[in-house]
Image: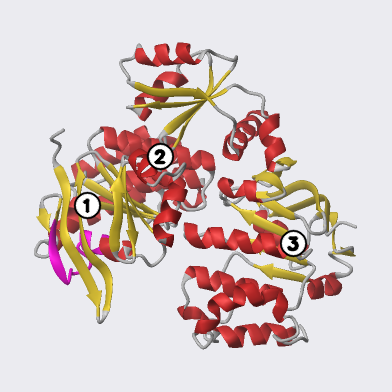
């Protein structure tokens, strides 16, 4: 039995179609990532699956229960960490955790095993008010509170947004160890570099899923010729490449430009082309796509089809 | 290269009681440079930036921004810099044109200049068709570029950006960096804070703050070499975990 099944889920707010015919499933013990920018519909989907919002059409189940008819069963079995910090700012760390344990009819002691690894990191500050914690600590506390009733499925809506690189890394390490305990996790993020940390991912944009697969499979299936180019003038190089007939797309990627061409090309030829514009070329290399390349490519195709 | 320095900072320090938020930082930023100012949450980035913006008085040390003293000429600094934050600073209930006019007015531009600037921004950003629409009705990417253009409405020497691209669409983010490249090509200095290390790779040089100090400062390439790392993310992790 899957942890989550989603079939033909759609939801509109007035004229805005937040979700358009969404289908996917998450297996038990799977870490599934919903990857997409702000406004893609990620939070709406979370609210539907955590039984806080009704879909306009379609069906969904969580741990085998229907999200509409059996919402009460689901609420007991899932942990939900919303995108916005929603613990009690004027309760201490300890009080928040004990509050959530009590609500779910359990105690901190009973399920301490599950939260222990995370809780020990914030325990030295357990008397501190939640409102006074740093971003990384708030996030750890929120995760503890979402786990304290030993849920079977964990919903984490953008847990790493606004959190620095170190805390982000620690957070993903925690997710990995939770997954090993058999908890299915649906996590959303706008950061494409986090995709590779998931077992499978769905790329989502404007309410539509563009692709679902294991990140490494998505990458090896990307067949377009892709080159990374480094020059002394990124902006001029971009403008030049976009005018060329062989260019399908040219986009800045940090210090590099990623160029997708219509046909495979010789690296040296690309280099010569750019050099003829009096731009210094440091490097041209054929590269494997990243999830971000794939997202950008798919979203461009989706736009053309609209 | 002898480029003009737009920011110079010497031992700049800010203490709050016993706590040293910014600990004797020293660096220069050059004309037309895209300078990334990085650090973990709570490393002191915001406090440092406030001192450079004339919003917070340094406890000790010295510095100049656009040739103006960060201790004595704070009011003038505010007139000579642009500022853009993640939350943008646009008024959602005003139209595109009204926002441009409003900020033009705030910065004391003449009526004639405001008119010219409005025309220029609408043309460059291709916003003529939506000039009279409320800002809240615009897609995120347009808002962001408009906010950037408006932060330069008074032709500042330097634009400070506080976490400008958090959470946005990868495509929008790229359009935005292209706008930054374009501004920098025209000689505008861009000072940008971010805690997303992949963004750092778009900068000419980056500094990394840890516990109030600047622990590293160089081009992304050289930093990666120095720390024997593949990505800026790794550089950052190595620095912070030491």
Where residue A208 appears, as percent x and y from the top left, is 70, 44
Question: Residues at marks 1 and 3, common chain?
Answer: no
Q: Which residue is mark 2?
A: B177
Label placed on residue B81: 1
Residue found 61% across the figure and 31% down from its top: A297
**Residue B39 within the magenta-colored segment of the rendering:** no
Q: Which residues are magenta?
A: B49-63
Residue found 32% across the figure and 65% down from its top: B44
Q: Is residue A85 visible?
A: no
Residue A291, quarter of the rendered image: top right
SS for callout 1: strand
Q: Chain of mark 1?
A: B
In the picture, the quarter occupied by the N terminus of chain A is: bottom right
Q: Which residue is mark 3?
A: A180
Q: Chain of mark 3?
A: A
CA gap between label 2 and label 1 equals 19 Å
């Amino acid at each position: 039995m899957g942890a989550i099944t989603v079939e033909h889920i759609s939801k509109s707010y007035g004229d805005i179609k937040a979700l358009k015919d969404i289908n996917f499933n998450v297996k038990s013990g799977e870490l599934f990532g919903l990857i997409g920018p702000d406004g893609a519909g990620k939070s709406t989907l979370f609210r539907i699956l955590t039984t806080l919002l009704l879909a306009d059409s379609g069906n969904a189940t969580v741990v085998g229960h229907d999200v509409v008819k059996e919402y009460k069963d689901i609420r007991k079995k899932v942990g939900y960490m919303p995108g916005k910090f929603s613990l009690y700012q004027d309760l201490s760390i300890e009080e928040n955790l004990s509050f959530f344990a009590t609500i779910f009819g359990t105690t901190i002691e009973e399920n301490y095993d599950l939260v222990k690894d995370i809780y020990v990191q914030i325990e030295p500050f357990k008397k501190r008010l939640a409102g006074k914690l740093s971003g990384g600590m708030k996030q750890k506390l929120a995760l503890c509170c979402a786990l304290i009733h030993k849920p079977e499925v964990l919903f984490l809506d953008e847990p790493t947004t606004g959190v620095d690189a170190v805390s982000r890394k620690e957070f993903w390490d925690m997710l990995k160890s939770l997954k090993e305990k058999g908890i299915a996790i649906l996590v959303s993020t706008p950061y494409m570099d986090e995709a590779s940390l998931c077992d499978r991912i769905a790329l989502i944009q404007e309410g539509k899923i563009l692709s679902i697969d294991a990140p490494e499979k998505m990458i090896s299936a990307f067949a377009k010729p892709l080159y990374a180019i480094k020059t002394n003038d990124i902006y001029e190089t971009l403008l030049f490449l976009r005018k060329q007939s062989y260019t399908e797309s040219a986009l800045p990627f940090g210090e590099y430009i990623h160029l997708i061409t219509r046909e495979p090309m010789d690296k040296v030829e690309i280099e010569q082309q750019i050099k003829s514009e009096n731009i210094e070329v440091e490097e041209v290399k054929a590269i494997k796509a990243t999830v971000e390349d794939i997202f950008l490519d798919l979203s461009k195709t989706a736009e053309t089809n609209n | 290269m002898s480029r003009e320095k737009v920011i110079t900072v010497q031992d700049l320090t800010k203490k709050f009681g016993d706590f040293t938020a910014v600990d004797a930082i020293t660096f220069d930023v050059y004309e037309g440079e895209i300078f990334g100012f990085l650090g973990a949450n709570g490393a002191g980035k915001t406090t440092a930036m406030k001192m450079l913006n004339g919003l917070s008085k340094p406890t000790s040390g010295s510095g100049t921004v656009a040739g103006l003293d960060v201790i004595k000429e704070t009011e003038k600094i505010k007139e000579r810099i642009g500022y853009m934050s993640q939350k943008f600073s646009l008024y959602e209930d005003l139209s595109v044109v009204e926002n441009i006019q409003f900020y033009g007015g705030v910065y004391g531009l003449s009526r004639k200049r405001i008119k010219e600037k409005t025309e220029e921004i609408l043309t460059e950003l291709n916003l003529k068709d939506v000039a009279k629409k409320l800002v809240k009705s615009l897609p995120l990417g347009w808002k962001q570029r408009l906010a950037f253009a408006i932060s330069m409405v008074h032709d500042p020497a330097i634009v400070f950006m506080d976490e400008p691209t958090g959470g946005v669409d990868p495509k929008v983010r790229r359009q935005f960096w292209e706008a930054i490249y374009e501004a920098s090509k025209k000689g505008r200095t861009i000072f940008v804070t971010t805690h997303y290390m992949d963004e750092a790779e778009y900068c000419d040089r980056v500094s990394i703050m840890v516990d109030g100090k600047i622990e590293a400062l160089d081009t992304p390439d050289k930093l990666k070499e120095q720390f024997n790392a593949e990505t800026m993310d790794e550089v950052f992790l190595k620095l912070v975990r030491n």
